[in-house]
Amino acid sequence: ATGKPRRVTSEDCGEVSKDAFQAYTAELYAYLGLLENRLFSEGLHVLGAEPTAASAAQYLSAYFGERLSEEAVEAVAGMKADETLEDVRAALERSLALPSSSSSSAAMSSDGEGEGVGGKDGSSEGGGVALAEAVEIRSLLRRNVEELSGAMKALNGEYLLPAVGGDLLRDGPGVLPTGRNIHALDPYRMPSPAAADRGARVARAIIEQHRAANDGAYPETVSVNLWGLDAIKTKGESVGIVLELVGARSVKEGTGRVVRYELIPLAEMGGRPRVDVLCNMSGIFRDSFANVVGLLDDLFQRAAAAEEEPPALNFILKHALEMKAEGIDNAGARLFSNPPGDYGSMVNERVGTGDWEDGRELGDTWAARNAFSYGKGDERGSARPEVLQALLRSTERVVQEVDSVEYGLTDIQEYYANTGALVAAANAAKEEAGNKNVADGKPKKTFKPVACSIVETFGEDVTPRDLEETLRLEYRTKLLNPRWADAMASQGSGGAYEISQRMTALVGWGATAGFAEDWVYDGAHERYVEDEAMRAKLRKANPQAFRNVLRRMLEAAGRGMWNADQATLEQLRQLYADTDDELEGVKTRP
């Protein structure tokens, strides 16, 4: 009746109506399907190691999806090095997983259509192309062994063949084999046409996601993270997101180089406003794409000066006018990063050492480290904390693109240290504005917490998800997944270290974005501490990493992120003390 979800147990399930329970089971079934089909990296990459048949099957299945049947994937993955496409075809025909060429042709000639065309059996034109491509990819994956010879050539100063870098799932087999001298992209052609189109689709989806959650209202300011390696791998999709939010497009010269980002007339924007964008740049993006930074700054400055447009349809202009009224200089600055020549938010360092009291502190650390404006002319790291704070106060949504299946939000520290800390900084700025109202004798200004959209662009679906939903998906499919855990733990010291780092990141997300759900910690405790075999494996492979796992669990409980019972906490304290003694060389009495 209230519209809020409720927890149902075996004792009170009779109180739930049949229709409500059926709706719940249908939703649960769909969610389990999403978890089952979610891609994740399994274990660490071993330099120069050829993928096993099982690993090759996973690659091929992820790449082709429904375009190739399970039987065809298994046949290609298991083919021997000296086997050909015809050998695979013959094997499939013998197993009846693939109609013979004659029967396939007969089927085609009867009605001109059929399951085979682009279908799953790999038999006719569309499927045949997919099967041939699968065999090519399998052959290229075998050449991973060239990584070692390539590394040796590089160390010896020898010539190494150049090749385009990228991701198999995103860019296709052209990125294989690995072990070559990879190059990225021409920064003067950013974003590429494909990246601009994909970025525009992402931006439109983000706007619709926001409107659906806010009674149809458009966001006034969206903060977009511009990361260097992401931009390189996606050819500038994050820049495409920014352009679409603002309402702009690339202008190119005859050679195809981008020379300007021009504002799209409001009349062509279908009645929607220009959304203001706070661009948080990584140090690599700032240094590698100075030309893009200059073009974006030029775009924002023109949008901030477009006084012929109504502020209600140009939030960049609206906010610039508000800042000017407060006497703030360069109210059109929108591109912020660390001080010149410096890198990182330092938030992960503080979380790593435990040197913090609350999320606001970490948000303040992020803001202090990212208060430097960049753009055209002499705008090369000018400290503009007042502009940054004004933009944080108006920020309603943070956008983070995840470009690869290899690393997600829970895998590396930089995501919570930037995305999570940016959310914390924006919430702190809004809270401070409300407190200022009270100091001025006005009613306290309430604010809606900043939302965060995560866009995973390594697949075809670019639907944005909320931060909390994405974190739950990642923890269920990685940290708490026995298959992932066993693969990591089997890789010795390095695997144990990776598990340990994900526990630190779990605390980091709780510190910055308030993500603190008991089931994650309960599951991690069950998987890595209560399981005696796993515990012994981690402790033997990397006792420092195992100690950190224990430390983060104790820290989470101490900071109120995890409601662990006293018996669990006592077990963790004892294990921590024993591991610490072991590392210090202290022998306890029998």
Image (cartoon, rainbow, N blue to C red):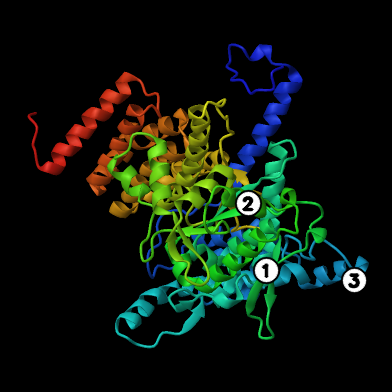
Secondary structure of residue under mark 2: helix
Residue at 69% from the left image edge and 16% from the top image edge = 16
**Marks 2 and 3, how far apart at CA:** 69 Å
Q: Is 15 on the left-hand or right-hand side of 426?
A: right
Specify the amino acid type for callout 2.
Leu
Vertical comparison of 536 with 78: above or below: above
Looking at the rendered image, the disc whose residue lies closer to the viewer, 2 or 3, is: 2
Residue 426 rendering spot, x and y as whole percentages: 51, 42
Looking at the rendered image, the disc whose residue lies closer to the viewer, 2 or 1, is: 2
Q: Which residue is mark 2?
A: 321
Residue farthest to the right? 111
Which of 68/511 is in front?
511
Residue 124 visible in this rendered orientation of the protein: no
Using a 10 Å C-alpha cutoff, classify the residue at mark 3 as few (fewer than 14 neighbours), some (14 to 19) or many (20 or more).
Answer: few
Using a 10 Å C-alpha cutoff, classify the residue at mark 1 as few (fewer than 14 neighbours), some (14 to 19) or many (20 or more).
Answer: some
Looking at the rendered image, the disc whose residue lies closer to the viewer, 1 or 3, is: 1
Asked which quadrant contains residue 157, the reply is bottom left
Q: Is 539 on the left-hand or right-hand side of 446?
A: left
Marking on residue 585: none
Of callouts 1 and 3, the N-terminal one: 3
Of callouts 2 and 3, the N-terminal one: 3
Of callouts 2 and 1, the N-terminal one: 1
Which of 54/318 is in front?
318
Residue 99 rendering spot, x and y as whole percentages: 76, 65
Asked which quadrant contains residue 586, the reply is top left
Residue at 69% from the left image edge and 44% from the top image edge = 209
Secondary structure of residue under mark 3: helix
Marking on residue 194: 1
Q: Which residue is mark 3?
A: 109
Residue 386 rendering spot, x and y as whole percentages: 48, 49
Q: Quadrant of the C terminus?
A: top left
Which of 8/448 is in front?
448
